[in-house]
Image (spheres, rainbow, N blue to C red):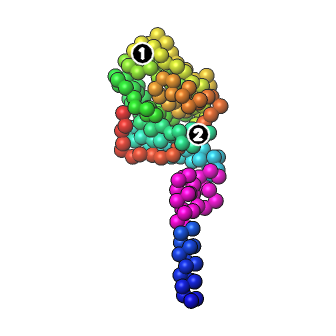
Amino acid sequence: MKRKLITIILLIISLIMICVGAILNIFNLDLILFSKFSENLYDRKFNINLNLGEVTDNDSVELCITKLEDVCFLLEVAKSKEKKQIGLMFKKNLDKNQGMLFIFDKPDIQNFWMKNTLIPLDIIFLDENLNIINIEKAKNINQTQDLYSSIKPSMFVIELNLYTTEKYKIVPTDSFWLKKIYRNTKII
């Protein structure tokens, strides 16, 4: 009788654990104190420069909006002078939530134009902590008359499809964080 009772209790406990695991999986929650939601945002920002300092032109990165945990962008890196000069020239399209991340050696006023660029773009200027400084709309493709500039010194610049910032309600008070580095992976 005791063995049957113990077996039934263990079976019930196992079923409860399976159900709790399934519920946590459905809502994408971590078991240990819901660490995904309580992660220290400062730590993510603090480590960003160290990690982005290690990337090369052959890498891609995934950057996410701090206020929107599930909105991320897969960005090809442009770090060398040559790749920054070419940027997205001659590209005919960008997939949803893809673009390019330009990395500069130090914060400075950054200037962009649309020479040989065939895609209208959102150009997002970021400081060294990945805080958005300003966003420019580059609607006029394949021209050099219009110049798109940061209003303060910028260390990073992101180019995305035009109106992506409106779609996700991204504004200059927002910031990004580095989710992942993809070594030797070009996405565009």
Image coords of residue 171 (percent x, y): 61, 28
Question: Which callout, 2 or 1, points at the residue further toward the start of the chain?
Answer: 2
Q: Give the left or right position of residue 75, taking residue 2 as reference.
A: left
Residue 2 visible: yes
Q: Mark 2 points at which residue?
A: 68
- The answer to which quarter of the image holds residue 68 is top right
Residue at the image position 58 percent from the left and 78 percent from the top: 9
Question: Which disc is residue 51 wearing?
Answer: none
- The answer to which quarter of the image holds residue 55 is top left
70, 6: nearer the viewer: 6
The outermost residue toward the top is 145
Residue 79 visible: no
Which residues, given as a range, are shown in magenta? 17-38
The outermost residue toward the bottom is 1
Residue at the image position 51 percent from the left and 46 percent from the top: 179
Q: Name the residue under label 1.
A: 141
How busy is the neighbourhood of tag 2: few (under 14 within 10 Å), some, or many (20 plus)? some
108, 124: nearer the viewer: 124
Residue at the image position 54 percent from the left and 28 percent from the top: 167
Image coords of residue 47 (percent x, y): 57, 47
Image quadrant occupied by the C terminus: top left
Q: Rounded to the nearest whole Å, what is the CA distance between mark 2 and mark 1? A: 30 Å
In the figure, 49 relative to 133: above or below? Answer: below
26, 72: nearer the viewer: 26
Q: Which amino acid type is marked by label 2?
A: Leu
Image quadrant occupied by the N terminus: bottom right
In the figure, 4 relative to 119: above or below? Answer: below
Residue at the image position 56 percent from the left and 26 percent from the top: 166
> What is the chief secondary structure element of the magenta stretch?
helix
Q: Which amino acid type is marked by label 1?
A: Ile
Q: How many labels does the image show?
A: 2
Q: Which of marks 2 and 1 is in front?
A: 2
